[in-house]
Amino acid sequence: NAGVTQTPKFQVLKTGQSMTLQCAQDMNHEYMSWYRQDPGMGLRLIHYSVGAGITDQGEVPNGYNVSRSTTEDFPLRLLSAAPSQTSVYFCASSSLLYAGGPNEQFFGPGTRLTVL
Amino acid sequence: GENVEQHPSTLSVQEGDSAVIKCTYSDSASNYFPWYKQELGKRPQLIIDIRSNVGEKKDQRIAVTLNKTAKHFSLHITETQPEDSAVYFCAASKFAGGTSYGKLTFGQGTILTVHP
């Protein structure tokens, strides 16, 4: 299993450009989420999904769109990039199969995004 | 919403010493508290977690304690080694019975450096 994969690893954008960060998992996990990591602020939840066709906002959703058409993929779209979106983005997934407690969230390798 | 505060932001210890990282949370309904380790340039990985019905949990050199009344929990690493050097994040979530996911709210992170 590849686990959680993300592309690209690095990206530089100009203000106003749009792009999609890709996230895929091959563990048949229902739950997928996107976080951004900024120095001194930990990881903050952007959007999450509990299954195909179901998405919801996290703590910092403004400026980002998501959709979930398949179990495997959960892309994150920046419609008009701003310098404030310069960050490292992590995708994570976990199973919803009830096992008596919360299931571990597995993180992807991250995408480092710079907006000029 | 939930707010998690983590201290200290940096921690420097000598090899063999113990390290303690503390977190406080605001939402008394939070009941799941994982700890993640992130090595430089890598993804966060779960190292230990605790649920609110348990006061302490140990896994070899790592232990986590939880004080529900005071709403704080701590990570203890004994006999530290240079390979323990990393950023450590605490997190909190409300795990609802019958589902196995929870939106994680992270602390700001602690940079641990273990000197040989």
Image (spheres, coloured by chain):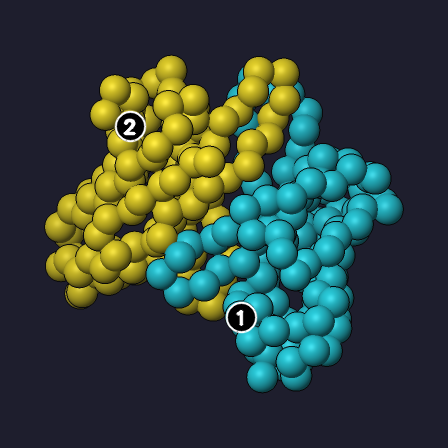
Q: Secondary structure at mark 1?
A: helix
- Along the line of sight, the residue nearer the viewer: B13 or A52: A52
A60 relative position to B40: left or right: right
Percent coordinates x, y for residue A23 in the rendering: 72, 57
Residue A24 visible, this angle: no
Please state the chain letter of the residue tagged with numbered disc 1 in the rendered image.
Answer: A
Residue A56, which numbered label?
none
Percent coordinates x, y for residue A47 in the rendering: 65, 47
Q: Residues within 10 Å of mark 1 (few under 14, many from 20)?
A: few
User: Taking B102 as reference, is A16 above or below it?
Assistant: below
Q: Colour of chain B?
A: yellow
Q: Label 1 amino acid?
A: Ser
Farthest right residue in view: A69
Q: Quote the CA–CA distance across marks 2 and 1.
A: 32 Å
User: Taking A83 as reference, is B24 above or below it?
Assistant: above
Percent coordinates x, y for residue B72 in the rendering: 27, 31
- The residue that disc 1 covers is A84
Residue B71, which numbered label?
2
User: Taking A5 as reference, is B57 above or below it?
Assistant: above
- Along the line of sight, the residue nearer the viewer: A85 or B79: A85
Percent coordinates x, y for residue A34 in the rendering: 62, 52
Q: Colour of chain A?
A: cyan
Q: Label 2 amino acid?
A: Lys
Q: Are marks 2 and 1 on the same chain?
A: no
- Along the line of sight, the residue nearer the viewer: A29 or A43: A43
Instruction: Name the residue rendered at 28%, 33% in the picture.
Output: B73
